[in-house]
Image (spheres, helix red, strand yellow):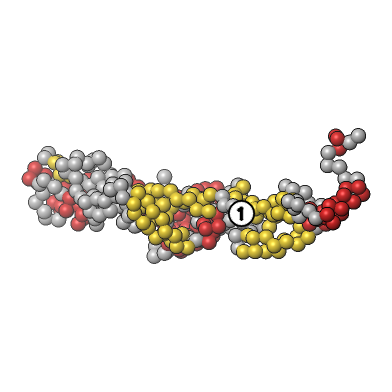
Amino acid sequence: MAYKDYYQVLEVPRTASEDDVKQAYRRLARKYHPDVSKEKDAEQRFKDLNEANDVLKDPKKRALYDQYGEAWKAVAEGHPPPGAERAPEDFRAQGFDFDPNEMGDLGSIFEQVFGGRVRGAARARRGGIRYDSAVDPRWAEPDIGADREASIELPIEDAFKGGERSLSLIDPESGEQRSYNVRIPAGVRPGQRIRLAGQGARGSAGPGDLYLRIQLRPSERFRFEGEDVLTLLPVTPWEATLGATATLPTLDGRVRIKIPAGSSSGRRIRLKAKGYPTAEGERSDLYAEVRVEVPPSVTPEEKDLLERWAALSKFNPRPEDAG
């Protein structure tokens, strides 16, 4: 399999910021999405974009990729970095007197040669060097604590607006409740993760990270229907019959909407691009579903008008009951 330069795939320099990576991915994902693109290689390009974005948007994966290139995943899984198996010969070539039978641990040497600690790093054992992804605890070097993940639910409106949010979680190690102030990106997607650096499990070399996976839940006013958003539009019987203009709350604020004459409950009015941000960075549609509501009580005059209307009208929504 040919080596993929993820920076070239996303058309960004190696100095690109996280925002640069995000913007480049959104721009190219829209261009090469198989459902809309007419490019011959759109499907493969879209897969490559997702693969590159998955690595470059994650600080830990990106750091390994920057250091080890195409071998980053092997290193992340605990395998030795490229060229490590040649270390004894390289040391001798540089004038070092290397004797594996007299050395107990090459950890510090590998840190100098390969630029830092790698999980599952090399260990010198009597009779030579052995690499294991599952290191014997007796030979293990200090390690960073494990990453953790928790889920948080947000109403659609809160996720759309983003902003600071306080939440409390139970620490699985101590059983204590811990509070966090989290910055929610505007338009965060379901399943997206927010990284809280250094808030994971403790380790001898420092804590891991805490990842908050976002779940979106319906609110009293909005709910998802596929990618689109649905809201109810209560109307009076006379507005439904004669048509009217009403004010409708949306994720962006209140807008004026026209109710067509003769609208029954269940009719949907589409507001283009007024829904929730999609994975491609566009906006889905918002649908206002008409719900005709009647007054809980009427005055004598209103009752008289309704009775006159009933006597005059030939409309019958239940023709099977006729006669």
What residue lies at 91% left-to-right and 47% top-to-bottom? 311
Name which residue type carries label 1. Answer: Arg
Relative depth, front residue between 57 and 308: 308
What residue lies at 35% left-to-right and 49% top-to-bottom? 170
Q: Taking the image as drawn, is residue 224 in sight?
A: yes
**Residue 116 horizontal/vertical position (percent):** 24, 55
**Residue 256 horizontal/vertical position (percent):** 71, 64
Q: Quadrant of residue 95?
A: bottom left
In the image, is 46 to the left or to the right of 137?
Answer: right
In the image, is 237 to the left or to the right of 120?
Answer: right
**Dot 1 alpha-carbon crowd within 10 angstroms: few under 14, some 14 to 19, many 20 or more:** some
Q: Is residue 259 above or below residue 151?
A: below
Pick the quarter of the image with the C terminus: top right
Q: How many numbered circles does the render carry?
A: 1
Q: Taking the image as drawn, is residue 21 in sight?
A: no
**Residue 137 horizontal/vertical position (percent):** 19, 41
Residue on which the image places disc 1: 221
